[in-house]
Amino acid sequence: MSRPFIEITHLRKLFGDVVAVDDVSLQLDEGRTAAIIGSSGCGKSTFLRCLNMLETPTSGTMRIGEDEVEFADGEMIRGADRSLNFRKSMAMVFQSFELFPNMNVLRNITLAPRLVKGMRRDEAEETALALLDRVGLKHKATAPVTELSGGQAQRVAIARALAMAPRVLLFDEATSALDPELVGEVLAVIRDLASEGRTLLVVTHELAFARDVADTLYFFDQGRVLESGKPEVLMENPQTERLASFLKRYSGQV
């Protein structure tokens, strides 16, 4: 039996005495989508930041494909030679877009491929224009990012992530900073990526979207995975009062 493409084992992250991520284990096959739900402050975003090593885990093991890293006492104790490949295999889309405000749309997308991957300018721009066309924003290629709507900015951020040709895409509440009428256009892009068979980890409060798109649902509570399984099973038959209460509060979205 083959190993899962992503395997996280006993991951913990402490900020001083505060336990943000507490003994989280997660598995995901390549080409599948996992949705992570839970109340604000339950550790969802910190978990993604640990996975992308924007935060250094306190302890635990993380593997993507053949690249595995291990942490103890807040330090990497194994896999330093694989850590660069590990990080390059992922790209993250943040809730606040994180675009460079002093650059236009095209430069935002081409900067990392040129600096990190050594891509020629013409090749990077050709790739960027194709990705902008895909998210419906090719006509905005030369626009300053400060002139974009929130939905447009987030679609540019998705195109920027795709430009690095990652094996895994991480979405951290990609719609939470958007006006309600703009949420749909971003979810449509993520839905298309999932249908293509890309590997996605999506932190979201959009429960109906999670139910429709995710192969596996993880419910976080106080830094731990309290329940996991098929979205329709968890949402129709929660096993804990905590998940039942959470679903009831967001029942209008399911």
Image: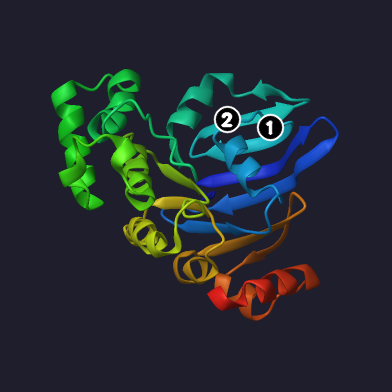
Rendering coords of residue 150 (x, y %) = 38, 49
| Residue at image point 41% right, 54% down | 31
Q: Can you identify the residue that label 2 sits on?
A: 54
Disc number at residue 111?
none
Residue 215 is left or right of residue 139, and the answer is right
Residue 81 is left or right of residue 165, and the answer is right
Q: How many marks?
A: 2
Q: Quadrant of residue 187?
A: bottom left
Q: Compare residues 75 and 54 and report the one nearer the observer.
A: 54
Q: Secondary structure at mark 2?
A: loop
| Residue 224 to residue 241: above or below | above
| Residue at image point 48% right, 42% down | 96
The residue under label 1 is which amino acid type? Pro
In the rendered image, the residue lying farthest to the right is 17
Rendering coords of residue 16 (x, y %) = 82, 30
| Residue 204 to residue 88: above or below | below
Q: Nearer the viewer, mark 2 or mark 1?
A: 2
| Residue at image point 38% right, 29% down | 100
The residue under label 2 is which amino acid type? Leu
Report crowding for label 1: few under 14, some 14 to 19, many 20 or more residues within 10 A (C-alpha): many
Disc number at residue 57?
1
Q: Compare residues 176 and 11 and report the one nearer the observer.
A: 176
Rendering coords of residue 105 (x, y %) = 26, 35
Considering the image in quadrants, where does the C terminus appear? bottom right
Q: Rounded to the nearest whole Å, what is the CA distance between mark 2 and mark 1?
A: 9 Å
In the rendered image, the residue lying farthest to the bottom is 236
Q: Compare residues 149 and 154 and report the one nearer the observer.
A: 149
Report crowding for label 2: few under 14, some 14 to 19, many 20 or more residues within 10 A (C-alpha): few
